[in-house]
Image: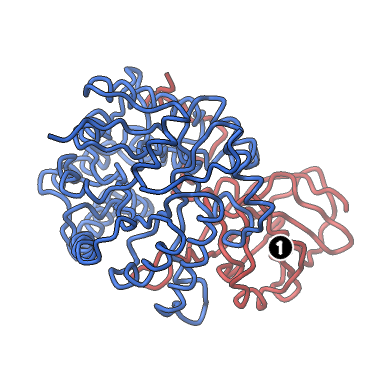
Amino acid sequence: MTNLGSPIQGVTLYSFTRAFHAREYDLEGLIRRVAADGMGPGLEVIGFSSFRGFPHVDDAFADWFQGLVAETGLVLTSCAVNTDVGIRRDRLLTDDELIAYMEQQIEAAAKLGFPLARVQISLTPDSMEKLLPVAERLGVTLAIEVHAHHHSQHDLVQALVERYEKLGSPLLGFVADWGTTTTGLAPSMVEAYHRRGASPEFLADAAALWNQYYQEGPPMNDASHGGRFGAFIELAARHGSPELGVDLAINATGLFGPARVESWRDLMPWVRHCHGKFFGIDDSGEEPSVPVRDLVALLVDSGYNGAISSEYEGWHWNYWDDAFEIIAGEQALQRDAATSAGSSMVVDTAQARAQLHDHFGRTLSTSHSP
Amino acid sequence: MPGIVKAVCPRNRDVRSVRLVINDRLIEPNSLEIDSGRFSVDVRIPWYRAVPASCIHDVTVRVDGQTAAPDAMRFELNGRERQLAELPDLVDEPWFTTDSLTVTGDLDIEPAAEHDVFVNLKLYIPYIVTAHGVLLIDESLETKMTGAAR
């Protein structure tokens, strides 16, 4: 019998993309606001989004950053790094170049004090094996994000699991993104398409097509995904909105995954971090398209003691609502869900720090503790 | 509650341009400057993260219907000004999330209370590789602003 888990509440600064991009907050201001609003203690940052000059990080900046995090009572959970194979214009990076490129970012994540680097699924099992010595040298967990259109049973994920089992390292794992297991298209996105000229018939058919795929289950390989992607483009063309086709196809297949919540269970031994992906909170305080209650209940039931980064992605189409208020709504929902599941979310800094220490099996940076 | 389901989009937004990218901010408001045949306008990255300057494929600027000649255009990033042809080699020169790419060029216009400013940016997204190669986003925005004399 597994003990019930107590996931750590947290947020990724990605949720505030529009506010940061608009220069309403600089990095320090955003971190202070997140802390003041009680959205931590977990803090996730995308390296290339928030750190100027990333992955080049000097000592003074790393000291300043860790000092700020300690002062504000936050705890670093995950630094998202990117698989930029396409930075050159003449060709893609070779495997060796990509490994070196990733190593630089993982070193930056470690220097900034993050216990985990989120990597992307374009890294192969071979690449992960090559990066394992880097993870071991730095004591950083490498976790591949499982994000729609992929899911726990997808060929690529299963190939990684196989390799992880062979390597047997506690430093390899996954980030579970909740957009993998949604139950429908977000009402706010459907509304945004309506405002962009999509007819009610088109939107009803798009919802029906998505529901059909939900019934059929998620695509088991990239060929199947490609077929669905094309079907959404065709649907838009058939309804006289060809300009919306690619956009709809990207969103309907890449943001709203049709896998079941239960599909995460087999992957849980490898899940080191979660993206609490969501798109909006309705008037009753619920998420209309992401089964947040079921997802939190599964984490609790699985004994998960890592962090959940609230990851608000409705900002892509919602230009008008305040992201802070929406995220506070999702975190309230998560806390309520954890209580309903017989546990609670961890919101205390010291408890979060101690729990992450056990979760990652390493000492978190405490050199700047107040 | 935030209630985004019933949220009202402000009337002055062109909601047809709502995309996965942040292209409603492609042009920095009121950044147009005009001085004796040269103009300057600030272009914002329409993405959530920094990419290297090598990912900037092309930039077009049109003011009041006149398109700036590519050869005379210059691009300032991180305090250095360059020509478009120099950008592909800059794999280690970031265009940061909150920085402007300041574009200057030749245009025969006079400062006025209102100008139509159009910008098109073609930008590679280096971590997304499609069947057609590295994803190239093609974003345009047209907006009105004053033209300040430099």
Q: Position of residue A67 (x, y in %)?
A: 63, 41
- Crowd tier of the residue under label 1, counting other residues whose Cα lies within 10 Å: few below 14, some 14–19, many 20 or above: some
Residue pushed farthest bottom? A90
**In the figure, is residue A264 to the left or right of A125?**
left
**Number of numbered discs present?**
1
Q: Which chain is blue?
A: A
Q: Secondary structure at mark 1?
A: strand
**In the figure, is residue A169 to the left or right of A264?**
right
Residue closest to the eye, A361 or A232: A361
Against B62, residue A332 (above or below) is: above
State the hue of chain B.
red
Residue pushed farthest left? A216
| Image quarter of residue B49 | bottom right
Q: Position of residue A163 (x, y in %)?
A: 22, 66
Against A96, residue A196 (above or below) is: above
Residue at x-position 51% and y-position 31%: A320
Q: Amino acid at mark 1?
A: Leu
Against A6, residue A215 (above or below) is: below
Q: Chain of mark 1?
A: B
Q: Position of residue B82 (x, y in %)?
A: 73, 72
**In the figure, is residue A168 to the left or right of A19?**
left
The colour scheme used here is by chain
Residue at x-position 12% and y-position 34%: A1
| Image quarter of residue A346 | top left
Residue closest to the eye, B22 or A272: A272
Residue at mark 1: B77
Residue closest to the eye, A164 or A26: A164
Q: Position of residue A133 (x, y in %)?
A: 39, 68
Which image quarter holds the C terminus of chain A?
Answer: top right
